Amino acid sequence: MSTIILYTVISLSATGIVAALILYFAAQKFKVYENPKIDEVEEELPAANCGGCGFAGCRAFAEALVKAEDLNDFYCPVGGNDTMQMVAKILGKEATLSDPRVAVLLCNGHCEARPKTNVYEGATSCAIASALYGGDTGCQYGCLSHGDCVDVCDFDALHMDTETGLPVVTDANCTACGACVEACPRDLFELRKRAKKDRKIYVACRNEDKGGIAKKNCAVACTGCTKCFKVCPYDAITMENNLAFIDSDKCKLCRKCVPECPTNAIIEIGFPPPKEKKVTETATDNANNKEEVLPGQSKTDQS
Amino acid sequence: MLKTFAKGGIHPPENKYSANQPIVSIVPPDTVTIPVTQHIGAPSKVIVNKGDAVKAGQVIAQSEGFISTNIHASVSGKVVKVDSIVDSSGYKRPAVFIKVEGDEWLEGIDTSDALNENISVSDEEIIPKILEAGIVGMGGATFPSHVKLSVPRGKNAEFLVINGVECEPYLTADHQLMMEKGKELITGIQILMRGLRVKNAYVGIENNKKDAIKHLTVLAANHQGIEIVPLQVKYPQGGEKQLIKAILNREVPSGGLPIDVGAVVFNVGTTFAVYEAIQKNKPLIERVLTVTGKSVTKKGNYKVRTGTPMKHVIDAAGGLPEDTGKVISGGPMMGKALNSLEVPVIKGTSGILIIPDEEAHRKPVQPCIRCTKCVQVCPMGLEPYLLQVLSEKSMLERAENEYIMDCIECGSCSYTCPSNRPLLDYIRLGKQQVGKLIRSRKQ
């Protein structure tokens, strides 16, 4: 009895050792060298696999980073500057830093401003609606409100506002991965430079029609009147295709353009509300006026 | 047993209310808007300026490139502006606005109705003349006809197939054209046969138009090589691939064209336009279309100049009914719902269909129950339920391998789906994206 057990153990052990040896040599023979730095770099990346860097996931990005001569064309929008600096340290290269950005919707055509001219009953997809026709309002450039952008957002930074029918960006969650920019068939998202306290001033319109037509179809459309263009002291505003565009890299958030816009197409976000004290200090006859047109610190801007 | 195509197909209610209504000409409106994109291919280049006086039949936009064609003024008058207008694509496109003054035609155009059966042009002159006249496929696809007639090297045309099927429900314009202009059509067919240098032509007509079959059979009896083929009533028999299968029993290969099996297909409307271009020197500036719908007071077949706003045509047919829910340019299966009645009639507008509100809405979408009805009716032998999901999930390479590009967008799958799934909507999206993928690969 004991001999059977003994032989069994010996023969199985011998088979195991032989198999281990074969596997060992096979592994040596067919070994694929992989730079250990790839793992190190991947560790630093946020593992969001969002594709915002232009590569198929964080692993692919790490491979490309390790292979690259310099890091000029590489940037992880989710991790931002900190991540890129850590990666650069591992690789002993210089990281190109970029300003943090945030997605902004360049359309403010809410239900009241943009009356519906027809009813769409097809599949709930902006891409399909856009391929089919100009949309259920008179504006063929504006938001279609079917939420393709919300579907692609991996970071819970977008949701549809049921009242306005427009998507809303939650700045705190947005990583500027650019998925919504790609998904929007109307090209309505822009990645703008993040300013202090998430303040923003931008032209929320993409309507390239002539002023009169644009305004007829949407009360808050940019008519291309050039008033903001003329008032901007920093040359941050450019005019093209009957549209004003505020370059977020040049804009100093002075807010001079905001009251100039006759259709309120320029939107300001994140600025403090008007201070009661200051309003009461000013002459009573123009206090109401100013409060309406320009809240808060804008008084100094206007004078 | 009548001939038909082998795979799939449906038979929706025919509703051909306007059958046997004589063709009535509609007086041109005050202003016509002629889009410069009325065909597949490159947009034509506008050659008139604001303030120019034009005559009916005068070229206002010239062909740009091989797959493109000329566009003519459909009325006489003054060019008011060159601007953009929403066309049936639902988007703004450049168009020439002409204010109508009188009805003066360019010299050399025979505007009379007199029949001219004597073909005096040489075979070589036919294709340039068809390009000159701006003729495109009038069944709805608007592919420039001179391109179809120019058979590529290495390919050989054996048969001409004339499409008198009119398988779309409601539409009757082609039917009426065959009844009223039979002799002209036979002459048009002879011209096309000479242009293609083929000996045999087949005219496919569905069996719900028995009078047209009889009428054309009598007329064709005197002409060698022209045969009228009665076909079983089945949608989408008017698709060229289905028609070739039905008449010649040949299958166009995946990704191929009819010429790959030796056939060239023309619609009867196009054939009549060819007759007018060659025999009357008249460019394609008016067409016969059906205005129909349950509540339309004067359902009928109307001859309309291109560039006429749909509203003008509908007014001529008794005005827009009160219960209107949807206005469709074309037939109910492949037509496009309009979002404005200012959309102009173009060369490819085969009808204006006005659907009452009670029938105009889609039913709520439910989950797929895997009943395979869509697979059974697909005339191309595809699996629509699968293609829909692949498109929805952006699995484009898989969709390409499942032959999504072979879809002819006939809508039989969406029509038959018991769960009211928007199959064709997604398949169209998938085709668009796969097309992009294929183009990017070629570069």
Image (tube, rainbow, N blue to C red):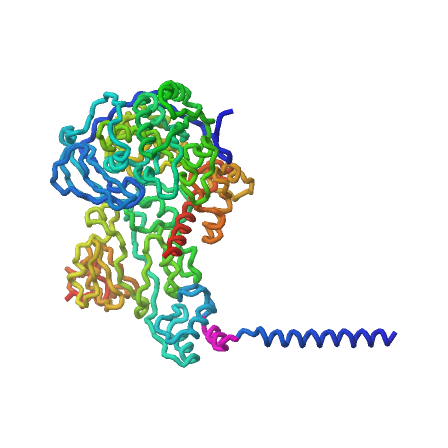
Q: To which quarter of the image does residue B189 belong?
A: top left
Residue pictured at 32% horizontal, 56% vertical = A188
Q: Is residue A115 visible?
A: no
Q: In the displayed structure, would residue A205 be above or below residue B31?
A: below
Residue found at x 18% / y 32%: B56
Instruction: State the residue in front, A261 or B425.
Output: B425
**Which quarter of the image is occupied by the C terminus of chain A?**
bottom left
Image quadrant in which the N terminus of chain A is located:
bottom right
Point out the stretch of residues depicted in magenta. Answer: A33-45
Question: Where is residue A204 shown, x and y percent of the image?
Answer: 27, 56
Compared to B334, does A173 lie above or below? below
Q: Main secondary structure of the magenta part?
A: helix
Residue B126 placement (x, y as % from top left): 27, 34
**Residue appearing at x 40%, y 54% in the figure:** B437
Q: Nearer the viewer, residue B441 or A279?
A: B441
Magenta includes A39? yes
Residue A119 in the magenta stretch? The answer is no
- Percent x, y of residue B135: 28, 35
Say whether residue B292 is visible.
yes
Question: Which is nearer the eye, B264 or B361?
Answer: B264
Report the number of discs.
0
Residue, far right: A1
In this picture, residue B365 sits left or right of residue A172: right
Find residue B206 and report its image quarter: top left
Residue B371: where, in percent of width, then height? 56, 40
User: Which of the 4 quarters of the picture holds residue A301?
Assistant: bottom left
Query: What residue is rendered at 42% in x and 65% in y?
Result: A55
Tell me if residue B310 comes above or below residue A274 in the rendering.
Answer: above
